Amino acid sequence: MSQPTDLPTVLPSDLMAEIAECGFYPRLVAETVALGLGGRPVLDHLVQHEATFAGHELHRHLTVLVRTEKQLLICHIDEGEGGRTEALATTEIVALRAIDSVVLTRALQDPAERGGLHEAWLSVVWGAARRVDLGPAGCEDPTCEADHGYTGVIQPDDITVRMSPQADGDNARRLIAFGTRLQAAVG
């Protein structure tokens, strides 16, 4: 399969270095980011490489968030499952004006000294996806056996990136910095 010839060939060197450092299909990741950017300049970025285990199988996933002047580009690269040698590369573009909420959460081990970052989460909500958590409804009568139906909560669930210094090193602090700058850009 031939490669597109009109791809922007240069991403910022720090973004390229972070992609290469992950060692997870760096050429595919860079190409995916470049395709999603469509020539728009990068103002800010965040790279997360995540490995999970399912039984005896390792599954790798990479997320790259890129902020341009007017958009947030979200790239996901997933490794094939079941020993398949394939990868799934997805890009999504969200207009900054469409973002409803940017939530930055920090878990600190030493809150009195505002230190000891344990974990950080960045959640971005623009209304594309919602998660429904359902459970059986009940009443306060412990002997009641009536069917009260279900109760539930609908929550926005567009994207959440979670990092910790133990798993991601200094990238957890980069997540906080990126999230803070994204909050300022969204306003």
Image: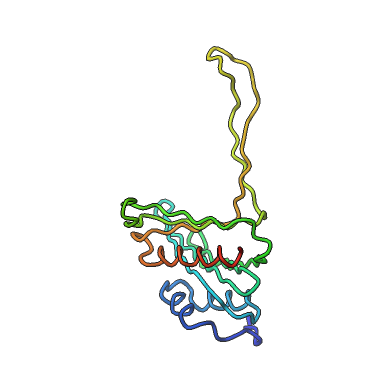
Residue nearest the observer in this picture, 140 or 113: 113
Q: Quadrant location of the N terminus?
A: bottom right
Q: Which of 85 and 19 is in front in this view?
A: 19
| Quadrant of the snapshot with the C terminus | bottom right
Q: Residue 177: horizontal and vertical position, in percent?
A: 46, 66
Residue 86 visible: no
> Picture coordinates of residue 154 (x, y %)?
63, 42
Q: Which colour scheme is used?
A: rainbow
Question: Extreme front residue here?
Answer: 112
| Relative horizontal placement of residue 89, taking residue 176 as reference (left or right) | right
**Number of marks in the rendered image:** 0
Instruction: Classify residue 101 by image quadrant.
Output: bottom right
- Work out whether residue 57 or residue 148 is closer to the camera in this orientation and state it: 148
Residue at 63% x, 75% y: name it.
69
Could you tell me residue 43's position as x and y percent?
56, 76
Q: Quadrant of residue 23?
A: bottom left
Question: Does residue 72 appear left or right of residue 177 in this picture?
Answer: right
Where residue 152 appears, x then y in whole percent? Answer: 62, 35
Q: Can residue 83 be seen in this view?
A: yes
Q: In which quarter of the image is residue 120?
A: bottom left
31, above or below 178, in the image:
below
Task: Give the vertical position of 86 relative to 160 (above or below).
Answer: below
**Relative height, residue 93 to residue 13 (above, below):** above
Which one is nearer the viewer's eye here, 73 or 99?
Answer: 99
Asked if residue 57 lies left or right of residue 185, the reply is: left
